[in-house]
């Protein structure tokens, strides 16, 4: 078992979102993810083309599961070093030992699981988790605390969600195929690490798949190495968010013939109570779910054919109360304020927030289901860039925000409890946890849509990638249907937390430097940053909207590469301008206006004791 006190909590903190195709402005399905643990934030292009028949795929330890692991040469600086994931992972390896594998899987199972198994693997973008593949299969993720979080066992318990996401992108075109592949792999090869919420989307639909491990202490009639999981489809006209706490709830054991979509893998719930049929008729679960929960004594009533997934397998929120739920409230409230959801709940197992929500409709048309406004990529970016502005939890106000309204609150944990169990751990204090957070390494907002290109139905996927924290980055579109590494910018694949060069070859450092520098005078500098952010993103949105409306992808790779270079150059230029303009806490705007002092706000001077200072002898 892992020592939970040694786990870096900032590795286990992400926000992930789904928007159904009938809730978006252009009919795209959207799957988004902020990777809020700062380690290796490179985006690597992994080429496809490897044979699947008879192939054995190596599996490696995932640093994002339980932190660094010396046994498998996993570090915060490099998540993987080796030859198995393409050229991008063979470079920048100086001083780092090659990753040691946990085991391998045989890809021959694909012919038994998929109707049209691939002969060769697909190419995709990869980070701490897989991002998106050439067929528009999209990934999102967040960590959730589970009651059991075991270490990996070489050749026995070898899979975590990150590797599962990569195998899915390598072998699947659709989200539901990915559910089936992941279900098979968990059963056959075992699951380790934290609980996880994994989002899987394609141009038609999106699924939420949640999973955790278990460890049986004595001989039970249940697989000892495996894991358990549940999966639920998000309605096409709904918005979904997960924020480090399981979101799927009631599972009803099939009371008729327990029809299996795939042998010993998927049960379809076809006979729930009538009053809940509409909300859970798209739920699947692992065949061992009820047996495991009873064997682990998580499910006390062995006669009941129903369980509540969240409290059965986890202790709810981790870190501190509202670490997760406040973000759920905020995201739902920004998307549909007419729901009037309360930010305060009774406990971490609340049912106050539904699994997913529809968009607001016209109150003057009570029978209409058409949203007043559908969501765009820009709208989702706005959700991710939030610090509770304008609410009672606003991080840009108060003494902790300093004189210039900085929302950054560096995490502190002086009392060292078991942060995964708030039933026993009572933190001495806590900051509000906003959706945008200083320690985010990367944000991606993926969209996929079916288009007619040359009279043929084609899926076009776009991955909008922003480096470092959402509030201070700039989304850049990338087209995953590329065939060679040179089609993806080297600057996106270059990054080392221990090696900073101003105006260097790493795109990530440009955004991270500016994001940190603006903390010196947030309210002033952020105005300039958001103006540039809006200008560059609006230009890119316009171009991609043209592609998605006309179905002409010719020249799209070239546009994405030129656009990203222009954005990165503009960000380094912004860094230089901010250094000069706000030197020594003053304002310099020209040769006749040099080092003009910037006054502290009077309200801040008052609360910090300025007016109690030495004013007379």
Image (tube, grey):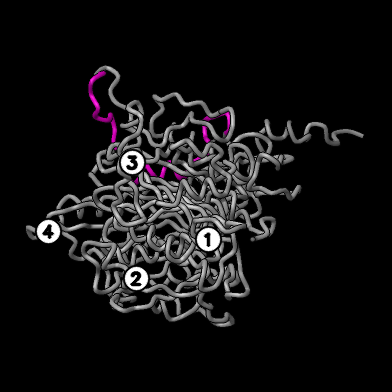
Pick out the residue farthest to the left.
Answer: 455
**Which corner quadrant of the image does residue 481 belong to?**
bottom left
Q: CA distance from mark 1 to mark 4?
A: 49 Å
Q: Is residue 368 magenta?
A: yes
* Crowd tier of the residue under label 3, counting other residues whose Cα lies within 10 Å: few below 14, some 14–19, many 20 or above: many
Residue 102: x %, y % from top left: 51, 73
Residue corresponding to mark 2:
488
Residue corresponding to mark 1:
224
Residue in front for this viewpoint, 90 or 582: 90
Q: Residue at x 58, y 27 (%)?
A: 346
Q: Which marked residue is nearer to the observer: mark 4 or mark 2?
A: 4
**Which corner quadrant of the image does residue 358 belong to?**
top left
Per the rendered image, the range of residues in magenta is 366-393
Disc number placed over residue 269 in the picture, else none: 3
**Cβ atoms under marks 4 and 3 closer than 8 Å:** no
Precedes in sequence: disc 4 or disc 2: 4
**Horizontal side, residue 396 vs residue 340: left or right:** right
Label the magenta part by its dominant secondary structure: loop
Q: CA distance from mark 4 to mark 3?
A: 38 Å
Q: Secondary structure at mark 1?
A: loop
Residue in front for this viewpoint, 357 or 279: 279
């Amino acid at each position: 078992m892992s020592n939970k006190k040694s786990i870096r909590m900032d590795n286990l903190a992400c926000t992930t979102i789904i928007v159904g195709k009938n809730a978006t402005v252009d009919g795209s399905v959207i799957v988004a993810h902020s990777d809020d643990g700062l380690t290796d934030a490179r985006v690597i292009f992994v080429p496809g083309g490897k044979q699947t028949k008879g192939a054995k795929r190596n599996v490696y330890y995932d640093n994002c599961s339980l932190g660094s692991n010396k046994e498998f040469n996993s570090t915060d600086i490099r998540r993987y070093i080796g030859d198995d994931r393409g050229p991008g992972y063979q470079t920048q390896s100086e001083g780092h030992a090659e990753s040691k594998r946990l085991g391998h899987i045989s890809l021959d199972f694909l012919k038994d699981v998929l109707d049209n198994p691939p002969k060769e693997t697909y190419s995709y973008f990869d980070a701490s988790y897989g991002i998106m593949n050439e067929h528009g299969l999209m990934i999102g993720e967040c960590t959730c605390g589970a009651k059991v979080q075991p270490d990996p066992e070489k050749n026995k318990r070898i899979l975590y969600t990150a590797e599962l996401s990569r195998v899915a992108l390598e072998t699947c075109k659709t989200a539901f195929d990915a559910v089936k592949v992941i279900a098979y792999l968990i059963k056959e090869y075992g699951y380790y690490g934290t609980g996880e919420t994994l989002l899987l989307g394609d141009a038609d639909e999106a699924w939420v798949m949640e999973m955790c491990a278990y460890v049986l202490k004595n001989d039970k009639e249940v697989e000892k190495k495996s894991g358990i999981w549940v999966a639920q489809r998000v309605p096409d006209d709904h918005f979904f968010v997960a924020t480090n706490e399981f979101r799927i709830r009631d599972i009803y054991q099939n009371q008729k013939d327990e029809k299996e979509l795939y042998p010993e893998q998927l049960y379809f719930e076809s006979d729930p109570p009538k009053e809940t049929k509409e909300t859970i008729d798209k739920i699947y679960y692992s065949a061992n779910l009820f047996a495991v929960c009873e064997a682990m004594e998580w499910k006390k009533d062995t006669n009941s054919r129903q369980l509540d997934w969240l409290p059965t397998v986890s202790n709810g929120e981790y870190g501190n109360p509202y670490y997760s739920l406040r973000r759920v409230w905020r995201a739902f409230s920004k998307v549909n304020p007419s729901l009037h959801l309360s930010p305060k709940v009774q406990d971490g197992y609340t049912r106050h927030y539904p699994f997913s929500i529809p968009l607001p409709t016209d109150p003057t048309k009570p029978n209409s289901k058409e949203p007043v406004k559908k969501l765009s990529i820009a709208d989702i970016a706005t959700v991710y860039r939030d610090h509770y502005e304008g609410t009672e939890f606003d991080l840009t106000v108060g003494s902790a925000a300093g004189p210039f309204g900085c929302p950054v609150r560096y995490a502190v944990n002086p009392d060292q409890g078991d942060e995964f169990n708030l039933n026993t751990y009572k933190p001495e204090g806590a900051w509000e946890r906003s959706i945008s957070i200083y320690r985010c390494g990367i944000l991606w907002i993926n969209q996929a849509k079916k288009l007619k290109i040359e009279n043929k139905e084609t899926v076009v996927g776009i991955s909008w990638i922003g480096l470092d924290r959402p509030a201070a980055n700039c989304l850049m579109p990338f087209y995953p249907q590329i065939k060679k590494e040179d089609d993806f910018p080297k600057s996106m694949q270059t990054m080392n937390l221990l090696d900073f060069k101003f105006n260097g070859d790493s795109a990530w450092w440009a955004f991270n430097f500016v994001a940190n520098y603006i903390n010196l005078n947030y309210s002033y500098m952020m105005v300039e940053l958001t103006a540039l952010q809006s200008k560059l993103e609006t230009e890119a949105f316009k171009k991609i909207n043209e592609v998605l409306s006309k179905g002409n992808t010719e020249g799209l790779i070239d546009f994405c590469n030129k656009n990203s270079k222009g954005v990165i150059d503009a960000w380094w230029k912004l860094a230089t301008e901010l250094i000069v303009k706000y030197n020594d806490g003053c304002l310099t705007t020209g040769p006749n206006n040099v080092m003009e002092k910037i006054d502290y706000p009077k309200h801040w001077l008052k609360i910090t004791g300025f007016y109690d200072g030495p004013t007379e002898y």
